[in-house]
Image (cartoon, rainbow, N blue to C red):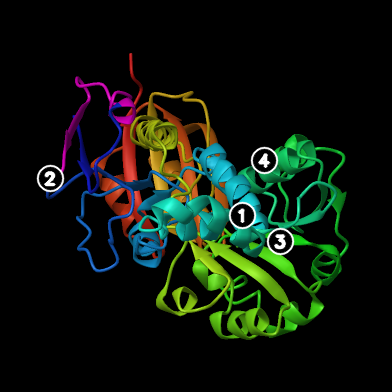
Amino acid sequence: MFKIRTLNPISRMGLEQLPEEYYEVSDSFRDPDAILVRSYKMLDMELSPTLKIIARAGAGTNNIPIDRCTDRGIVVCNTPGANANSVKELVLAALFFSSRKIIEGVTWVNSLKKEMGEITKLVEKEKSRFAGPEIKGKTLGVIGLGAIGVMVANDALALGMRVIGYDPFISIESAWGLSRNVIRAKSLDGLLGESDYLTLHVPLDDATEGMISSKRFKAMKRGVRILNFSRGGVVRNKDLAAALKDGTVASYITDFPDPETLSMEHTLAIPHLGASTPEAEDNCAVMAACQTREFLEWGNIKNSVNFPDCEMQFSGNRRILISNRNIPGVVGQITNIMAQEKINIADMLNRSREHAAYNIIDIDGDISHESISRIQAIEGVTGVRVLYLQE
């Protein structure tokens, strides 16, 4: 029986993927096999020795201590694409809000409640303050062509926009889903110089933090409207303030409010509503639960952010799962121990990702506790688990 701890409320549809005969789910387990989490801050949380996997029902994982997990052999996975449609719809709404000053106009009208007899005259007199251009025929630059970026690009085309995309690391799956009418940008600065609207869909990491800075603002078309549905740190606030003040940026909409952007004119802050739909919460929970089950029952890794994705059909009597630091000689020592015990390897998969590696080894017969202990003692090995073939 596997114990699953939930650190946030998880959609019922997700929990239904964990059969009661194999899984216990609670928000109070002290020594769980797995954790399902949404936005709960785990950075200072003690990690139980029994913990094998953390599944984030969402895309961002900056609330999880990934380095500590990797050192302990704990797999961290997320659910890319599960909330893509929800975010895409909000981006499209922001596209219109950035042009037509709809929010500003509605806020102003609601301030007229005491002018009941004069509202019609006031509206006709002042409505020009909230005028803005149509998006049809304008150019949208999409930075980051993952699941969300591809959807935004395709739908913007359907709305009559010219769309340019930039993603030097686009996946094969995303490339298949992207419309052939999306123009491929040869460089980021080239895209910035052509875009009337700019939408950001990149993860926040060392390479993207502050990527939209004074240098990039100088390359932009004057009067550009920027939508940031990546993370707040992708845009450097100090440089954004200057670009808004001098007219380089006509408006800025973000789903990640902070004190600095809230004090800037021509900005609109949305309270992180990108994935706040019941459909997105269900999709993320189902995906997180299924990935957790796949790992606990079969040892397969899907959508991990700290270990390589690994998947292999069960072909032996036992399955040995080994996580280790990606250093030379570890695999050789593992197979040498098995050879000494005359264990026949039926199938084997070894994958690495940056500093971490993962091995799936199916064997005929059994393996002794002594051999497992010897494998665990190998320098660089961070975790060992043995699964039995399910009849």
Label pair 2/3, CB-CB below 8 angstroms: no
Q: Which secondary structure, mark 2?
A: loop
Which residue has dot 2 on it? 29
Mark 4 to mark 3 CA distance (whole Å): 15 Å
Q: Is residue 345 left or right of residue 376?
A: right
What amino acid does circle 2 point to? Phe
Total number of numbered discs in the rendering: 4
Which residue has dot 3 on it? 198
Q: Nearer the viewer, mark 1 or mark 3?
A: 1
Question: Which label is found at residue 151?
Answer: 4
Depth check, front residue: 370 or 110: 110
Any part of residue 240 in sight? yes
Question: Which label is found at residue 124?
Answer: 1
Task: Report the span colored magenta.
Answer: 13-29
Say whether disc 4 or disc 1 marks the residue closer to the N-terminus: 1
Q: Is residue 132 magenta?
A: no
